Image (tube, rainbow, N blue to C red):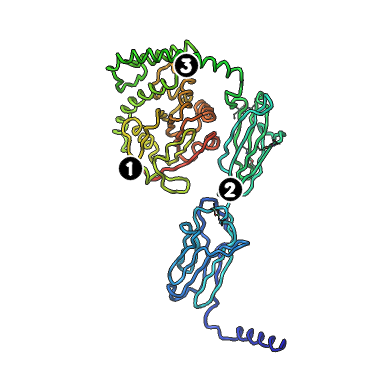
Amino acid sequence: MKVSMDWTLVIIVLQVFFQPSLSVLFTVQAEQTVYQSKYGEKVVMGCRFSPQPANPKSDLKVTWHQITPSSFQEVIRLDNGEISASQIYQGRVRLLTEDGWAKLEMSRLRINDSGTYQCLVQTSDGDDYKSISLSVVAPYKSVTKHIEEAAEAGDVILTCQSEGFPQSSVAWQVGHQRTHNPSNTSVSETPDGLLKITTQIQVSSSERNNYTCNFTKDGSSATFHIPDEIPQKSKNDAAIVIVSILVITGVVTVGVLAYRRRISKKGSRAHSVHSTRNLLVDGEDKSAATCIQIDKENADVVINVDDMEETLGSRLKAFYSEYSAETRRHCGAFSVEELPQRLQNNDGQPVNPLDLLPEPGETVFLEGLPGNGKTTVAHILVSSWAREPSHSLDLSNLSLLLCVDCSAVKQDLYQEIKTQLSLPEETSAEELRTVLTKSGKVLLLLDGYREGNHDFDESLRMFLSDKGGCRVLITACPGHCPTLMQTAGAGRTLKFSLQGKSL
Ligand SMILES: *[C@@H]1O[C@H](CO)[C@@H](O)[C@H](O)[C@H]1NC(C)=O
Ligand SMILES: *[C@@H]1O[C@H](CO)[C@@H](O)[C@H](O)[C@H]1NC(C)=O
Ligand SMILES: *[C@@H]1O[C@H](CO)[C@@H](O)[C@H](O)[C@H]1NC(C)=O
Ligand SMILES: *[C@@H]1O[C@H](CO)[C@@H](O)[C@H](O)[C@H]1NC(C)=O
């Protein structure tokens, strides 16, 4: 029995060697055996086969599989000239077969797309396959930071958070030295398979120091300037009590004043606000300007936010109406209807123009190359708010829209707002900050922002770190505000881009 089996084997081997092989041996080669790609991006893995069948339509069968320790999952196949993708990959994979190539293109890569893939090619000349390994990584890009009071008086807890894959270590530095404060770092997995790393240290709030957390795998970092960045409220509890008393006194005063003003307003309704640039000065507006002054005399910190929001709102609308008619004549702008074709999210998908509107407390970045129409978008938003609510971009739930042209800023954020929007000289930074942060119905639109102006950058950074409900939309050229994007502060940070040229 044993002997006859051996002989059978020898005969087969001899046959293989001596059979006149008319056709060349059919082989499949991998273009690369290892691919590395990024989360959300696209990869094309290639297998080359030869010889090519004379009639590929009927005589070429290609199958790509993903192999995991527990399964052998078909990804996509070509059979009888028909390509079909498996349900779980549908919409994300394509098979490219031409000139002896069987390429698998996978887009919107996920972390769990990592693994081994196999391309199997079958023709009448023979079958062969190769294995390829793919690893999907996600760089730790934006670092969000947060400061809170520690249980121990005089200390604060600094928190940094970022997402990526695979694991990164985190180093904390004081100035340029590695810090010896013990850090508390935890890792959790997001539904997308990314690792969310949160790291904290506790430091003294009185020592002047710069603390930096560094996600060392990709070198992404965020810096805390202590004590400058500590939110006002945690600096001094006594101040809160005093301010509360002042606020209560103030509200009563302002209530009385507002009542008187309403009465006096009835008489002066006839002089309605005309599009004037000196917004808070003439006609009916005197009462408001005076009101702010009186408030100041009575209680330094008190502003009636609702009143100021309302008066500012109608003045800005008048201001913008004039301004947008003027600018429209100068730039051949595109219309709101064209926006959806130009706006894209991080994955290159089209975006509804309304998504541009940040939620309360949210910061949205809109990036576009010079000439792509960022300023036109700003004009569309401003005029939709001020005059022409369009069905696709209804901004009527915003009580205020403050648009700042950042192309030539020289002063700090509040000064620029005052100068550019012609607000009265006596409006204080604190008043503006209060109105901006209070209600969640205010949009601050920074058009054409670029880092590099110290006063503006610094005041903007401080504002964003404590912006309350303010909605912030920043348009910029790619790469013009790297620091800001990393430290955009609490709340969600979204990034869109604008494609195509403005006419
Ligand atoms: C680390 O953080 C976790 C969660 O925030 C907390 O429960 C734990 O007490 C912290 N440990 C130290 C040593 O601070
Ligand atoms: C892979 O991850 C995605 C989320 O990114 C999830 O929806 C999907 O179910 C996962 N697939 C497997 C096979 O675990
Ligand atoms: C912190 O950094 C800022 C600017 O990055 C610098 O001006 C300042 O001197 C630093 N402070 C300390 C205490 O190192
Ligand atoms: C973060 O760490 C990386 C790697 O150790 C280093 O190259 C980089 O300079 C660090 N960044 C900062 C801001 O310290």
Q: Secondary structure at mark 2?
A: loop
Residue 371 in percent (x, y) is at 38, 40
Assign a secondary structure to mark 3.
helix
Q: Nearer the viewer, residue 34 or 78?
A: 78
Residue type beneath disc 1: Glu
Q: CA distance from mark 2 to mark 3?
A: 48 Å
In the rendered view of the protein, which quadrant contains the N terminus? Answer: bottom right
Q: Report x, y in % for residue 448.
A: 43, 34
**For residue 194, which numbered disc appears in the image?**
2
Q: In the visual, does 91 lie left or right of 275? A: right
**Which of labels 3 and 1 is toward the front?**
3
The residue sitting at 37% across, 46% down in the picture is 341
CA gap, disc 2 and disc 1: 36 Å
- Distance from disc 3 to disc 1, alpha carbons, whole Å, reads 45 Å
- Looking at the image, which residue sits at the far left? 270
Residue 373, quarter of picture: top left
The answer to whether residue 249 is above or below residue 448 is above
Q: Quadrant of residue 266?
A: top left
Res 337 label: 1
| Residue 385 sits in quarter | top left
Three-letter code, disc 3: Val
Q: Is residue 375 visible?
A: yes
Q: Disc number at residue 251?
A: 3
What amino acid is at disc 2?
Answer: Leu
- Tell us which disc is closer to us: 2 or 3: 3
Task: Give the percent coordinates (x, y) of residue 469.
Answer: 48, 30
